[in-house]
Amino acid sequence: MFIHNPLPIVALLFTVVLVSTTAARTETSASTAAFVVIVHKSTSTETLSLEQLRFFYLGEIRQWPDHRRVVLIQRDPSSDGFKQLLKAVVRMSAAEYRRFQMNTEFRGDEPLTLKTLNSPESACNFVFNVPGALGIVESAALFSAACKERVKFVPITDLRSGGR
C-alpha cells in the first residue's frame, strides 16, 4: 500500500529517548519509545502542539474549548518511560513535577485532576469513559483492541520545531 502523505501518521507519534543505567554497568544504553496522545472521542480538538500539551500538564490549560474540564492521565511516576516523557513534555524530572503539584496545592490553587494508570489499555478504558480525559500512552495502543476504536488519537503538530 502506498501512502501519499505520511505526515499525519508521523505527526501522531512522538519519540522520547530513554536512557537506562544500572549500578553494575557504567555504560549507558539508549532505547527509543514512541508515545501517542489520546482523548475522549467527544473532544473537538483535532491537533495539539507540544506546548499546549505541556500547558495541560502544568495546569495552565484546564478546560477544553467546549469548557469541559480536562482530566489528565499519568503513568506510574516511578517508571523510566514516564520520567523521560515528563522531561520531554513538561521539562521537569518526576521529583520536580511532584513538587510542582504539591506547591500548587500548598498555595491554595486548584490541584490538577490527575489519574494514575498502569497500562495503555487501562488508560484507553478510562479515556473512553471520561469525557474531557487526556493521556499519553505508548504507541502500541494504536493497535490495541481496547484503544483502537474507543478513543481519539490526537496528532502533535510541531515536532519538527522542537515544540517551540
Image (cartoon, rainbow, N blue to C red):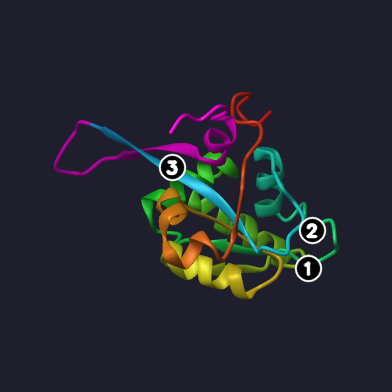
Q: Position of residue 99 (x, y in %)?
A: 58, 57
Q: Is residue 128 magenta?
A: no
Name the residue beneath numbered marker 1.
108
The tag earlier along the polypeptide, 1 or 3, is 3
Q: Is residue 10 left or right of residue 20?
A: right
* Circle 3/circle 2 CB separation < 8 Å: no
Residue 24 position in % (x across, y down)? 14, 42
Q: Quadrant of residue 78?
A: bottom left
Residue lying at 62% horizontally and 42% vertically, measured from the top left: 155
Picture quarter with the C terminus: top right
Q: Residues within 10 Å of mark 2 (few under 14, many from 20)?
A: some
Query: What stretch of residues is rendered in magenta?
Result: 1-27
Q: Residue at x 63, y 40 (%)?
A: 156
Q: Residue furthest left?
A: 24
Horizontal side, residue 80 vs residue 164: left or right: left
For the view shown, which residue lies furthest in the bottom direction?
129
Most extreme residue toward the top, as rendered? 161
Label 1 or label 2, whichever lies nearer to me, is: 2
| Amino acid type indicated by mark 3 | Ala
Give the Cα distance between marks 1 and 3. 36 Å
Which dot marks residue 64?
2
Question: Of helix, strand and loop, which one carries label 1?
Answer: loop
Percent coordinates x, y for residue 10 in the rendering: 52, 33
Q: Amino acid at mark 1?
A: Gly
Measured Cα–Cα span from mark 3 to mark 2? 25 Å
Depth check, front residue: 8 or 60: 8
Question: Which mark identifies residue 90?
Answer: none
The residue under label 3 is 34
Name the N-terminal-most of marks 3 and 2. 3
Check the image and report above or below for 77 versus 49: below
Q: In x, y percent, where is residue 29? A: 25, 33
* Residues at discs 1 and 2 in contact (Cβ within 8 Å): no
